[in-house]
Amino acid sequence: MKKVLKNLGIALIVFLLVLLVGILVWEYSSEWRAEKSGEYLAKSEEYVEQGSGQALWEIEKAYWMGMDYGDFRVFRTIKMMELNDVRVEGEIEYLIEKNLGNDDFYFLYADRLYKEGNFEEAEKYLLKVGDKISKKYQEKYYDYLTYFAGLNGDWQSARTYSIASDSDSEFSDNMNLGLLLLLDEMDNQDIVEYDVDIVDKVLELKKYNGDLYIIKIADILIDLDLSGWARVLLDGTNWEGEIDRDLYLIYGKSLVKDGNCREALEYFLEAEKIDSVNQEVHGSLMQAHKCLGEKEWEEWERLKV
């Protein structure tokens, strides 16, 4: 019995010594491990640029080198979003539930929601982004701030964000032109690089005033893929006269642009009640027909009867 206890004692001492040595080695190698972890994370960035899932393996190796667990989960989720990894939804839910997200995570999640057409949620998470967002996301971040400020009818803030963006994307260019029109800061030199149809519409603006001037600006906004802005402009206008037909048509056109075909059709039908022989009304109804598709159009006609 004494021999057994002696052996157990020796084993315990050996275990404790090994544990102590392990702790000391782990502690004294912290600088080296941090360097290796950084190398693995840098390598993961290279793989993301190549669209390779190998990036996630590099992040795992960085974690084994002592990377903080929370940082690991956030960083891995960000890279999974950048790679459009099919497993990312569960990771996103985990970070939101545990409130572990950082600025980059919230931006990329807002970007994801925006692309899915979930604008309300996209704006909600975009507003969680602070001043620690990575430089590579900043231009698009300000583009989104510009867009949502416009959806809220805050054209001045939208202009401020637009200037901060300094982006040369088509999305940014379209918003810049839209803001120049909305804030009445238009100069002909600002439109020379745009599609000829948009240029023609901008140049024709000087022919209009009052209600029609607003409708023509809304029409240009729709052509610039800013149909949400167009509706905000129309909703916030105090109309001077009776131009219901044109107003219905432009609302409908904006909804077609957003793929909201059934609601667009309702607006076009209201325009038809006012002027059933108008060619523009007829063309709009055909546009709604095309937007809905043959099957849904036939279903709608059956319900109408």
Image: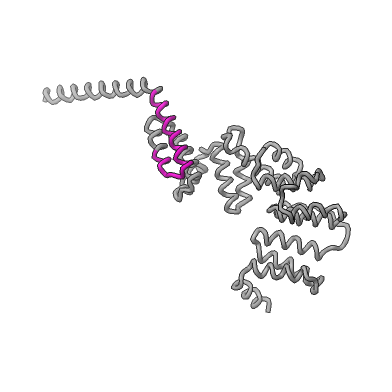
- By secondary structure, the bulk of the magenta-drawn segment is best described as helix
**Eyeballing the image, is 95 above or below 269?**
above
Quadrant assignment, res 300:
bottom right
Residue 112 location (% of width, % of height): 56, 48
Q: In what quadrant of the picture does the C terminus appear?
A: bottom right
The answer to if 255 sits in the magenta stretch is no
| Left or right relative to 303: residue 58 | left
Image point 11% across, 23% down: which residue? 3
What count of labels does the image hold? 0
Q: Nearer the viewer, residue 149 or 44?
A: 44
Image point 79% across, 48% down: which residue? 181
Q: Nearer the viewer, residue 178 or 264?
A: 178
Q: Nearer the viewer, residue 39 or 103?
A: 39
**Eyeballing the image, is 243 above or below 53?**
below
Q: Nearer the viewer, residue 137 or 124?
A: 137
- The magenta region covers 32-57
Residue 275 location (% of width, % of height): 81, 71
Q: Does residue 235 appear in the picture of this structure?
A: no
Q: In what quadrant of the picture does the N terminus appear?
A: top left
Residue 234 location (% of width, % of height): 78, 55
Residue 141 location (% of width, % of height): 62, 40
**Eyeballing the image, is 300 above or below 135?**
below
The answer to if 38 sits in the magenta stretch is yes
Q: Does residue 68 appear in the picture of this structure?
A: yes
Identify the image's colour scheme: rainbow, by chain, secondary structure or one colour. one colour
| Left or right relative to 216: residue 124 | left
**Eyeballing the image, is 302 above or below 35?**
below
